[in-house]
Image: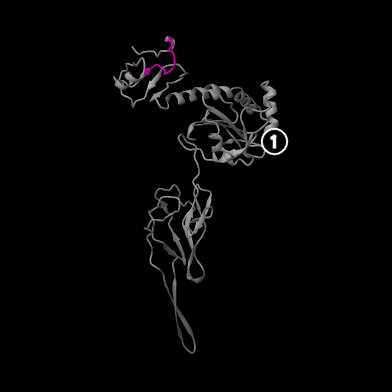
Amino acid sequence: PQMVVVVCVCFGSSSSKSFAMAFAFSQPRMVSQPQMVTGSQPQMVVGSRPQMMTGGVTYSQPRLVQGSPQFVSSGPQVIRQAPGGLFQSQPRIVSGSGRTVVGGISSARIVQGGTQASKPQWVMRLGATVPDFQCETTQGNFSFHEFCDSDPARPWTVLVSHPADYTPVCTTELGRCDTLSGAFAERGIKLIGVSCDSVDDHLGWTQDILYREQREDQGQLTFPIIADKDRSIVTTLGMLDPLEKNAAGIAMPARALVVVDAEKKVRLSILYPATTGRSFEEVFRVIDSLQLTSDLQLATPVDWIPGQPCIVAPSVSTEDASQRFSNLQIESLPSGKEYIRFVDCPGAEQDPANQPDQAE
């Protein structure tokens, strides 16, 4: 805060009095020291300008903070005189954050000792570790990480989200998941669903799903469904579809499918709109490719299906590839570069019809 010193001098006589007032303003300041924000890298204010005095009110120019996407968009910050000769800033709106900043501190943040403490938001991306969260499900309560570790024979996990119970597309999808549970198990994968209704709703809905698949005698689905009535889980995992809303105008969960490996890392994320059912043939195709290529330095070409030839990764030399893999074939290209190199799919008997076409 800046102190304004007011000096008053009085001149008096028996007939009149006159006053002279002099104002002493503090010198303009350049902000140059790094500002430390808890939970983030030190931020240096760049392009800060001296403060200007206008009519007894101090205005500061908007500031751009290096390394931050936030810019003060509401115009100059108004600094008003407060009791005791100090200056207090008006609340500022920071563009794109939806937060009101008072005195430079976000009202949405925890403030201790003049610093800001913030909790980073998890982002769905390949290789990210899925956060742990509590699950209230049709097959008991547990944490998500506990479920991931629950079956050594099936160390991978597929999480599927659904907009709501008793909806037509979701009913067909969960029925398909139940009939495919054995195919997932063969690949070392267990299933778990999440829908934004209660456990009781899930259990009632399950009877319709099993009836359609003619599996009523089963009693329950082969996998649990998480109850996420407050949408906290689908919100944390970024599974909402802003274009699809319920009768109350609330965004519905999208049809997300996440493949999580034994280390709880995201290996595949597919986000379908709420209006489109999934293709499990494509899901299996990608899972087979992931599990085949994980440690072999191979890749799979367009429209690949299991058993067809694979592509050698660029990081592997041709000499090494010829020793490690069977039936190395190098495509001849106009550039003269030998970067498309096919080999037999490991562990599969090759059908001549599946061999790649060779360029003339």
Q: Main secondary structure of the magenta part?
A: loop
The kind of secondary structure element at disc 1 is helix
User: Image quadrant of residue 35?
Assistant: bottom left
Instruction: State which quadrant residue 9 falls in.
Output: bottom left
- Whether residue 270 is visible: no
Q: Give 119 or 183, whichever is nearer the viewer.
A: 183
Percent from the top left, x then y, of residue 255? Answer: 58, 31
Of residues 4 and 16, the one drawn nearer to the viewer in this rendering: 4
The structure residue drawn at horizontal position 54% and vertical position 40%, both measured from the top left corner, is: 132
The image shows a total of numbered marks equal to: 1
Q: Nearer the viewer, residue 112 or 135?
A: 135
Q: Residue furthest front?
A: 152
The amino acid marked with disc number 1 is Asp
Choose between 68 and 117: the one closer to the eye: 117
| Residue 320 against residue 203 in the figure, above or below | above
> In this figure, which colouring scheme has been used for the structure?
one colour
Residue 71 location (% of width, % of height): 45, 50
The N terminus, quarter of image: bottom left
**Residue corresponding to mark 1:** 200
Residue shown at the point (62%, 33%) measured from the top left: 225
Measured as percent of width and height from the top left, residue 113 is found at 48, 60
> Residue 125, relative to residue 52: is it above or below?
above
Q: Is residue 50 visible?
A: yes
Q: Residue furthest bottom?
A: 14
**Is 322 placed left or right of 353 in the picture?**
left
From the viewer's perspective, is 343 left or right of 258? left
21 to 334, vertically: above or below:
below
Residue 173 in the image: state x and y as whole percent. Answer: 61, 26
Quarter holding the C terminus is top left
**In the image, which residues are magenta?**
342-351
Label 1 Cα crowd, 10 Å radius (few <14 / some 14-19 / many 20+): few
Whether 282 is drawn above or below 238: the answer is above
